[in-house]
Image (cartoon, rainbow, N blue to C red):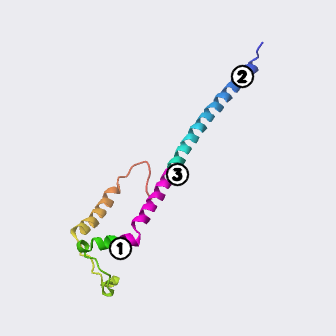
Amino acid sequence: MFRTSDMVLIAVMVGAAAFTYKTKQEAEHELATVRKLESSIRFEKDSIDLLQADWSLLTQPARLQKLAEAYQADLQLGPVQPHQFARIAEVPLRPLGINDIIGQSLEATLEELTTDQTTTGAVADQ
């Protein structure tokens, strides 16, 4: 009644249907993941827009002027005078601290420790 070739063809068709179903399910899962990511990106962009609007509101010159006037006694702010500007050459060098010295020696020590000098039979350096 059924030949072996018929049985093989039926098995191939069932296998192809199973593969197609599995591929479709994986594609739908990935599509759902992409949609969640797009939604998250949209939310983050909206949050950035809102934060930029808040920053713009908080840094308005008129608002800052009112705050400076309100806290003039506490902050002791005044207009910038021309003699307050300096060139880079006029800025004093920062004194060398112990952390700078230790940091340099630690970097050299760490480099020595991370270089493994052990020779094995697997790979020979040339």
Callout 1 amino acid: Gln
- Of residues 101 and 50, the one nearer the viewer is 50
Left or right of 74? Residue 10 is right
124 is higher (above) or lower (below) than 68: above
Q: Residue at x 25, y 76 (%)?
A: 76
Q: Which residue is mark 1?
A: 65
Callout 3 amino acid: Arg
For marks 2 and 3, give the CA distance. Answer: 48 Å
Q: Residue at x 44, y 65 (%)?
A: 56
Q: Earlier in the sequence, mark 3 or mark 1?
A: 3
Q: Earlier in the sequence, mark 2 or mark 3?
A: 2
Q: Which residue is mark 3?
A: 42
Secondary structure category for the residue under label 2: helix
Asked which quadrant contains residue 23, the reply is top right
Q: Position of residue 108 (x, y in %)?
A: 30, 64
Q: Among all residues in the image, which is located at the extreme bottom?
A: 83
Q: Earlier in the sequence, mark 1 or mark 2?
A: 2
Callout 2 amino acid: Ile
Span colored in magenta: 42-64
- Of residues 81 and 105, the one nearer the viewer is 81
